[in-house]
Image: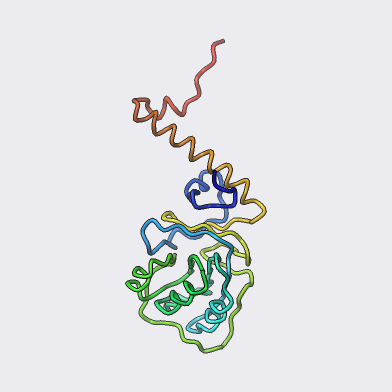
Amino acid sequence: MPSTLDLRDIETATLGHFLESGFMAPSIQGVLSNARSFGPALTVRMQGDDGAPLVEALSEAKPGQVIVIDRCGDLRHACWGAVTTAAAQAQGVVGTVIDGFMTDRSAILAADYPVWCRGRSPVTTKPRGLGGDVNVTVNCGGVAVRPGDVVLADESGVVVLDPAQVAGHVARARQLQADEITVLARLKAGETLAEITHKTKQPA
C-alpha cells in the first residue's frame, strides 16, 4: 500500500471529482505523453525576457521538487529549453510547470523530462538580471502557489494542494479510484450506468 503522501497513483481528474480549487488553467498541458510528477513547489517569478531568476532557482533546487514558474503574463518568450532541462535533471528536479512557453521540444522529449506549459515559442529569455523572485508566493495558471505547496501534474493537467490537506485528499481519491474499478467491471458485466448510480428504493 503506497504512503498517503505518495501521489504516484493519484490522478488529477480524480481529485477534480471532489475539489474545485487549486487546478491550473486547462491550457497548461504536459509535453510528454502519460507523464506524472508530484512534489513540493520551488516557485519562480520572472518577467518578460529576463531569465536570471530561473538560473538562480536551478542552482538551489533540491531533489524531488517541482519548479513552478509565474511568467507574469508574458506571452512571447520561452523560458525553458534543453539547457534548463539538463540543469533541472542534474539537481534531481522531477518536473516543471510554466504559465508560459518553452522551446527545444525534441530535446525535452529525448531527455524524458516532464514539462507542463501553454505551448512553444522560438523567442527565448536571456539572463539580464533585471529582477524577479525565487521561493515566494506566485500565480501560475490562475492558482496561488506557495513554496512547498504540493504540486501534482499528469495527463489531465495540474493541481496545487495544501500540504496539510494532502493526506485526506489522497485517501479520498484512492477510494474513488477503487470504486471506479468496480463500476467498470459492473458495466462490462452488462449493468447500465443508471442502474449503478441510482439508489435502490427501499420497500415501504
Quadrant of image for the N terminus: top right
Estimate the x, y position of residue 15 in percent, counting from the top left: 53, 47
- Foreground of the two, 37 or 169: 37
Give the residue displayed 57% in from the left and 75% down from the top: 45
Tell me: residue 21, above or below residue 29.
Answer: above
Viewed as shown, does residue 202 lie left or right of 112?
Answer: right
Quadrant of image for the C terminus: top right
Estimate the x, y position of residue 113 in percent, counting from the top left: 42, 67
Q: Specify the color scheme.
A: rainbow
Estimate the x, y position of residue 80 in percent, counting from the top left: 44, 76
Tell me: residue 112, above or below residue 127.
Answer: above
Estimate the x, y position of residue 176 in percent, counting from the top left: 51, 39
Furthest residue in direction right, as rendered: 164
Furthest residue in direction left, as rendered: 106
Give the residue displayed 48% in from the left and 68% down from the top: 96
Numbered label tally: 0
Q: Quadrant of residue 144?
A: bottom right
Tell me: residue 39, above or below residue 166.
Answer: below
